[in-house]
Image (cartoon, rainbow, N blue to C red):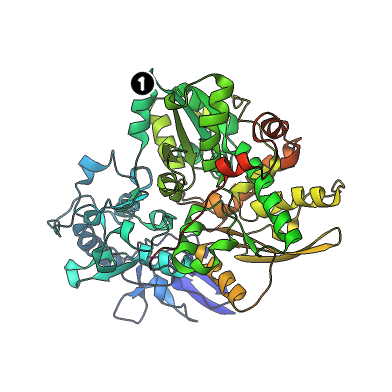
Amino acid sequence: MLKAVIDGIEMELKEKMSILDAAKKAKINIPTLCYEEGLSIYGGCRLCVVEIEGEELLKPACATDIQAGMEIKTHSKKVRNLRKNLFELIIATHNIDCQLNCLTCSRANNCELKNIAEDIGVSKMRLDPIKRGEGIDNSSYSIIREPEKCISCNRCIRKCEEVQGIGIFTTANRGPETVVTTFKNRGMGNVECTNCGQCILSCPTGALHELYQKDIVLDILSDQTKHVVVQTAPAVRVAISEPFSNQAGDISTGQLVTALKRLGFDAVFDTNFTADLTIMEEGTELIERINSGGKLPLFTSCSPGWIKFIEHFYPEYLDNLSSAKSPQQMFGALAKTYYAKEAGIDPEDIVVVSVMPCTAKKFEAKRDEMAGDVDYVLTTRELAAMIKSAGIDFLNLEESEYDELLGVSSGAADIFGTTGGVMEAALRTATELITGQELENIDFDSVRGLEGIKKAEVEIGELKLKAAVAHGLGNARRVMEMIKEGEEFDFVEFMACPGGCMGGGGQPISCADNVLEKRQQAIYRIDKEKKLRKSHENPYIKKLYDNYLEKPGSEKAHRLLHTKYKARKI
């Protein structure tokens, strides 16, 4: 047992930990900027310095282990004065007039700089801003980089390299001229960026944010010559309320639909419908590959960040990818064909807007292979901003239902929003289609949870299906290396973002604890409460095949719902 004193509070600790973690246990808040839970310790900002009795120099709490007998002061006068000086030096590199720019800054509602200034007691700046003269990097379809806002905390560098295993960021220059940039300053659209947006979630200053399309969509909604339809991804409904309530894990499906209708969309549909459709197409593909000796393992193709990752780093495995488009792109293709036909609308007049938890979906919509399916993609954050700008009281809205034709879905589609969900949805359908028997228990617990890599062997009649699930691109790389080394799987689900879509780069940046766990619990709650829980039992999917696509895997289905991918240079 280790005994120490923090701000006069006597503590008994059972294990070794940093002063920062010990202070958290004592309910003492120490300001940090370069620190982020789950990333390596950088210790660059020094805002977390503390005073240790008997030591002349202040020590960074994040990088200093607590020792037996330590007496620590976290907010002494000496500590407060140094923190103020350090913060002023840091903020001088943030060459932005926050008073003028806070209304448009992506971190305006949860600005870490503002919160730290309040914690430390900084009310005015004595130093002139350091001007680096770097322009905005808008080379990407998904992510914008504003170097003048960057304070070189290196969180984006560590997130990209340590969690996602990509490493597109680096630092250049020295001292106050230090900048975070991409390889040879080529821009994010010209390097191996997968557009996952995890760097946005880590950036404390708004130097990284999505390519905004909300203003364009608002303009189109006012165009009476256009029929504007919208689709919402599974993970959006368990996160859209967070910017309004500051709570994670609330289910807001009905309020989401009402808000979209109030914004003026002509039809409000659900990406869950085409998630069910994806299971039919991808499940059929899996069964055909198993029966015909086709290329295995089959890789899921729902996550555009994962798709770009394999195109860059494992192009020799592109034939293992399912040819099925993602649910987003399937929806766009059907909206401009099947829906247009059923509604009697000229496809040229239809504009398809997606609301996604994912920044990579913006890139996906621009891919040459599927260009024209989806016109504009909004992140969950962008939609929240639109709702606020329209004066809609989101939390107190009445609930509405999705429009039916492309809006009815099963619980299997809802769980697409979490890691393991696509796998579980596919197993529910594949098992019943292969065996011809109804499942007694449709919950596949072996593929659930937030463990980075999950393996399962599932008995489907006489078949023993070897499955794997990986979320976060660092884990995806590990699974790919397992496969290269000879480990055998039949079916693998890959999601680019930690937690799957619910942890996507376009989701609200939350300060709540256990955000992913709470969102995941909400997703499984939606599934459990639905009467319809299997994709192949969706009556509107059956209607689609009967009236339009004929059958899963048909020539027409392949023309509309399937695609190919290509190798990309590293």
- Quarter of the view holding residue 275: top right
Closer to us: 538 or 341: 341
Q: Is residue 235 visible?
A: yes
Vertical order, 4 against 566 (above or below): below
Vertical order, 431 against 54 (above or below): above
Vertical order, 394 against 180 (above or below): above
Q: Image point 62% across, 50% down: which residue?
A: 520
Callout 1 environment at 10 Å: few (<14), some (14 to 19), or many (20+)?
Answer: few
The spot of residue 205 in percent (x, y) is 31, 53
The spot of residue 16 in percent (x, y) is 53, 78
Q: In the rendered structure, which amino acid carries the disc numbered 1?
A: Asp
In the rendered view, does 137 fall on the left or right side of 50?
Answer: left
Q: Image point 43% across, 57% down: which residue?
A: 198
Vertical order, 2 against 529 (above or below): below
In the rendered image, which quarter contains the C terminus? bottom left
Closer to us: 399 or 358: 358
The spot of residue 386 in percent (x, y) is 40, 32
Q: Is mark 1 on a helix, strand or loop?
A: loop
Would you name the residue on which mark 1 appears?
Answer: 223
How many numbered discs?
Answer: 1
In the rendered view, does 296 fall on the left or right side of 306?
Answer: right
In the rendered view, does 83 fall on the left or right side of 62?
Answer: left
Closer to us: 459 or 70: 459
In the rendered image, which quarter contains the N terminus? bottom right
The spot of residue 110 in percent (x, y) is 38, 46
- Quarter of the view holding residue 453: bottom right
